[in-house]
């Protein structure tokens, strides 16, 4: 059944648009309209009754009543009692992005209607959200309900949706150290994260290989430690642009400055920061992790993280702490002496803890919360109760045990182990990513609630601007649905059907998301 | 040592430029100039003494004498006694492509100097080649000798090179059936093949999934069998463009029309071509391989391959013949009856041979040579002595045995088994591709000579325009060097060094070739 109706979408955002910062949890409720397109149905053997919705909303009520959308009759407007007014550029910009063909300034935002219900007898779609971030997600969902015939005419079916994310933290890690990622690539992937309702960009910005972050306080770090001091750095303006671009899409930017290991590039521009390694009784000329026994180290960290806390507005910073190699510390006579003085014996994890503890104290003074990789917890470092433990190691049984241990100790946790998307293999590996569930471990309900989400990680050894985007999408979309949709959304065939069409939607929006299997998109990718 | 000299390159091509068709073997000799760049040297731990040459020429003599190249002094000209004159657009166009910053019509081609030697006391580079295709390869090599300082100033070192390919057939298979590949993607990859001295594009143009080839004789094949009859087809003009674009780069286009299996898409537009499968005593509604017992099948094939032989000028066509599933033939009572009449018993490979033999006779009348996948040989089909057997199955031991069997039977052969680049894995899998050698099997010298080369295959189940190019390059470059360079060019560290820089050169030329490992390129890829 299809009816041509003048169609007006009403937007009722219940919270102020301007002045909002990201909130840690973004719940929202919205109502609108959905369906399955005929054209999309040809792509897969069994089209989903949920069309191309991705990630699947919590509750979807379908109808076969359809409305035609035309650029002359279609408007997105703010409801009269909405606290987000027409000046809320955040919502308007987003609408222009997701429905570009309706970007008509002459008709947009012309009406203000007060309602919070959808009446199928009236040609209105109503979107309600307690926070503007939810309204953003709702607009994305709305765009996923619109379908085209082969002449480009757009329709939408009567649908009611209530939605909210299962997990508050739905992240993607990108690594700009092993390879420098041009800003353009980062922005395109933030755009794609928004299409998938991913709300955290974990920016693994520096590592052993290079230090592209241009620090105002310590410019020598990138001057000496970047692959190139001018072409391969992120200037303060670049970083600001990334953060604002992300914020406008409901995405938090959490930077990671990983210490005391993974810091070879730091040492080039900051003398004495790293531990000199010894070969017998003499320095070998190589360097190990951050030197934890010098006061200058902590002076540096204080100044550095003071800058970081100002540059990155998010309430959290990721402090790393993974994979500390003790070989160099062991070789250094000054370190050995310090170990004796402290009574650490030969237990270098105590030295690691000593360093981390001091670092956590420093970061605490910046009033940031912190996330650390699981080793810091495993090594028994004393942590603030609100520390977030990031699980990344082991096989399935091992990471499930780790999740149980972390949560039984009362800490909140994030899972990444099953979502190392840099690890590629032949075939549909997205299915494995889709099946992993971060709450599948032995623990109480209270423990399960301490799992606040997860992150897909795309480490950069084999990834740069040439291949990052197709390698990430739609594989990260599988993680996005796992972290957003209800726990029982596990039908792999239904997921294949929806994801195939969602992938073509990303392609249609200019994102080179790779195919799941033999198939075609109505509009193939136009780049090379 | 560096000297600023007015530098003029002389081009002496010993064969006619115009009117040439691809020759089966392209040997050539050329002489010119080389070196290692300082900037490139930073990319890898151990810069190669051969700089960024890829594939490595047969003989390279190095010098530290360097010349500066400037756009005002640099010219590429034809020697007086060259049979290729200034009207040879093939060479001129190519030069413009590989040295775009020297594309200065006011100064180019201004001189004609007769010499076939390189004198380091005179500022001349001389390129000699018996055929124009060799001259094209030589110009690519020349471009690989030019290096830049960080201000973009170009230099070249005195160098003498003699070069020719180890194998005549150096191919890449692309599959435009599992996913449609837009023309733009095909052309970009032909351009990249030329950069790697790959000289055969094996176009696996149709298969079960879709039939994008628009046949003038049987337009219903793509009308019904393509993913979309207008947007997902290769028109006669498209095909012509691909062939000419390839020819100008010294690349042959060998189309594959695989039968009798892999033909589901053919059946949609050509009634009665495929075998009706039976469920018990009734047709099940599904279809199997080409129906080998009807005269109409052979009438169709005669007309179809008559068209193909005219559209594709190469002397060879690939006829497939792989993976024929006998299940449907077995189910069909008419087929069973035919088997009885022919005395085939229950040996369906005899029926397959019956079909293939008739097909080969048909193609022979078009005066084309043919390539077939190894099963056709394995099943004992009678073949013309000049048939090319394409080996693709098994593990290392199995394909080496197959190469031994094929060549001991006197047939020429191509290897692809170790070069299925669609199979991906984490890490530097290019090293495995690099180590495989098509002449490593037990056999006489005469047998080894029957190995005319190999092909890297990128089957299309998981590949389309979004990810094809970075997945193919530089992994296919490893195969390119194996097929071009001397058998003893096996130093993996030297290869890593040269390939890293070659990869960045491809990136600099706009090709998203993916990284080998953590590193950077002076000019990163600018797309997404």
Image (cartoon, coloured by chain):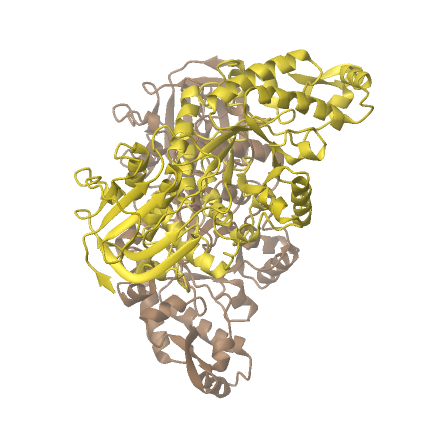
Chain colours: A brown, B yellow
Please, is residue B436 above or below residue A267 in the view?
Answer: above
Residue at horizontal 61 percent and vertical 24 percent from the top: B263
Residue at horizontal 48 percent and vertical 46 percent from the top: B480
Residue A122 seen in this snapshot: no
Q: Position of residue A97 (x, y in %)?
A: 35, 34
When asked about the image quadrant of residue A317, the answer is: bottom left
- Quarter of the figure that contains the N terminus of chain B: bottom left
When asked about the image quadrant of residue B87, the answer is: top left
Q: Where is residue B428 in the image (x, y as percent from the top left)?
A: 52, 54
Please, is residue B72 above or below residue B302 in the view?
Answer: below
Of A374 and B364, nearer the camera is B364
Q: Where is residue A76 in the image (x, y as percent from the top left)?
A: 34, 27
Residue at horizontal 58 percent and vertical 19 percent from the top: B365
Residue A190 seen in this snapshot: yes
Give the tally of numbered discs. 0
Of A129 and B102, nearer the camera is B102
Q: Where is residue A468 in the image (x, y as percent from the top left)?
A: 44, 46
Please, is residue B200 above or below residue A246 in the view?
Answer: above
């Amino acid at each position: 059944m299809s009816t041509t109706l003048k169609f007006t979408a009403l937007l009722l955002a219940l919270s102020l648009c301007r002045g909002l910062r990201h909130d840690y949890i973004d719940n929202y409720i919205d109502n609108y309209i959905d369906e399955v397109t005929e054209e999309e149905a040809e792509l897969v053997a069994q089209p989903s009754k949920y069309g191309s919705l991705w990630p699947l909303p919590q509750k979807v009520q379908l109808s076969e009543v359809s409305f035609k959308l035309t650029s002359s009759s279609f408007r997105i407007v703010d409801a009269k009692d909405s606290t987000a007014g027409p000046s809320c550029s955040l919502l308007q910009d987003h609408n222009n992005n997701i429905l570009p063909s309706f970007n008509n300034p002459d008709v947009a935002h012309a009406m203000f209607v007060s309602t919070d219900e959808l009446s199928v007898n009236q040609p209105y779609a109503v979107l309600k959200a307690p926070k503007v971030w939810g309204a953003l997600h709702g607009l994305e969902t709305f765009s996923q309900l619109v379908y085209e015939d082969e002449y480009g005419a757009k329709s939408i079916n009567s649908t009611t949706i209530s939605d909210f994310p299962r997990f508050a933290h739905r992240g993607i890690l990108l690594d700009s150290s092993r390879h420098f990622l041009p800003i353009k690539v980062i922005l395109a992937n933030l755009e794609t994260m928004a299409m998938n309702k991913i709300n955290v960009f974990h920016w693994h910005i520096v590592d052993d290989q290079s230090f592209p972050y241009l620090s105002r306080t310590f410019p020598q770090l990138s001057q000496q430690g970047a692959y190139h001091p001018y072409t391969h750095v992120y200037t303060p303006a670049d970083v600001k642009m990334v953060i604002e671009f992300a914020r406008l899409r409901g995405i938090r930017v959490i930077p990671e400055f990983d210490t005391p290991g993974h810091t070879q590039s730091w040492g080039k521009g900051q003398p004495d920061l790293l531990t000199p390694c010894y070969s017998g009784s003499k320095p070998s000329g190589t360097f190990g992790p951050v030197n934890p026994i010098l006061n200058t180290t902590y002076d540096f960290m204080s100044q550095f993280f003071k800058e970081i806390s100002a540059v990155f507005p998010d309430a959290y910073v990721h402090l790393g702490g993974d994979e500390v190699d003790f070989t160099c510390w062991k070789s250094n006579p000054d370190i050995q002496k310090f170990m004796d003085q402290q009574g650490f014996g030969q237990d270098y994890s105590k030295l690691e803890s000593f360093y981390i503890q001091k670092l956590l104290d420093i970061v605490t003074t910046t009033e940031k919360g912190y996330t650390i990789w699981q080793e810091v917890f495993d090594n028994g470092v004393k942590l603030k109760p609100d520390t977030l433990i990031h699980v990344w190691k082991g096989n399935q049984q091992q990471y499930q045990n780790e999740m149980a241990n972390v949560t039984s100790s009362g800490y909140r946790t994030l899972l990444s182990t099953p979502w190392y998307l840099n690890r590629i293999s032949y075939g549909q590996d997205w299915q494995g990513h889709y099946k992993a569930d971060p709450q599948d471990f032995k623990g109480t309900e209270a423990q399960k609630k301490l799992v606040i989400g997860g992150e897909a990680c795309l480490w950069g050894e084999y990834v740069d601007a040439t291949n990052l985007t197709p390698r990430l999408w739609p594989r990260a979309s599988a993680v996005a649905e796992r972290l957003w949709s209800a726990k029982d959304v596990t039908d792999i065939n239904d997921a294949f059907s929806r994801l195939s069409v969602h992938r073509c939607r990303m392609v249609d929006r200019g994102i080179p998301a790779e195919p799941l299997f033999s198939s075609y998109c109505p509009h193939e990718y136009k780049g090379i």
